[in-house]
Amino acid sequence: QVQLVESGGGLVQAGGALRLSCLVSGITFKISVFDWYRQAPGKQRELLAVIDREGNTRYADSVKGRFTISRDNAKNTVYLEMISVKPEDTAVYYCHTYLPARGAEYWGQGTQVTVSS
């Protein structure tokens, strides 16, 4: 059974920092590509960052320079480091992966991040 479990969300003041974690099980972690998305109330889900099996990354313009995606293959965990957060970063943050061999995508349950001004 594939599971993605996010943690690390919470309330943070504007300008502060937060680190989200996504613990993955049920798949071959080291060959998989992972993403972080977020969804704010009344808005569409937004792709924030992607990391491939080699550790190459890319980011949405809205978070470039402030957010960093990383992975620890020994711990089957993907991270999203957030710095200089803004109130507009308030959203539910989701970890995601797509497995081409299965033709299936998987989502975590989400973790709420709230940035106070």
Image (spheres, grey):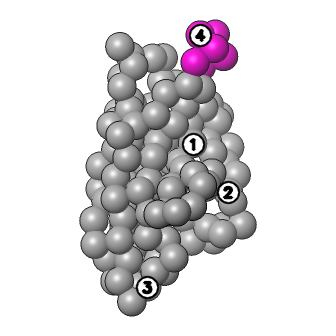
Marks 2 and 3, the one that precedes in the sequence? 3
Q: Which residue is mark 2?
A: 59
Whole-number angstrom distance, CA of label 4 to CA of label 2: 26 Å
Q: Give the left or right position of residue 31, taking residue 26 as reference.
A: right
Amino acid type indicated by mark 2: Tyr
Question: How far across and down, in percent of the image, does residue 35 sit?
Answer: 57, 42
Q: Label 2: few (<14), some or many (≥20) within 10 Å?
A: some
Question: Which of the two discs, 4 and 3, sits closer to the camera?
Answer: 4
Query: Do the numbered discs 4 and 2 sit on residues whose CB atoms are within 8 Å?
Result: no
Q: Which residue is mark 3?
A: 15
Q: Label 3: few (<14), some or many (≥20) within 10 Å?
A: some
Whole-number angstrom distance, CA of label 2 to CA of label 3: 20 Å
Q: Decide: is 115 above or below 50.
A: below
Quick one: SS at disc 3?
A: loop
Q: Which residue is mark 1?
A: 35
Q: Label 1: few (<14), some or many (≥20) within 10 Å?
A: many
Marks 1 and 3, the one that precedes in the sequence? 3
Amino acid type indicated by mark 4: Arg
Kindly tell me whether residue 73 is visible in this rendering. Answer: yes
Q: Which residue is mark 4?
A: 102
Looking at the rendering, which quadrant does residue 104 occupy? top right
Q: Residue at x 67, y 57 (%)?
A: 59
Question: How far across and down, in percent of the image, does residue 33 sit?
Answer: 60, 32
Q: Residue at x 69, y 60 (%)?
A: 60
Q: Which residues are magenta?
A: 99-104
Amino acid type indicated by mark 3: Gly
Amino acid type indicated by mark 1: Asp
Marks 4 and 2, the one that precedes in the sequence? 2
Whole-number angstrom distance, CA of label 1 to CA of label 4: 17 Å
Marks 2 and 1, the one that precedes in the sequence? 1
Taken as a whole, is the magenta stretch helix, strand or loop?
loop
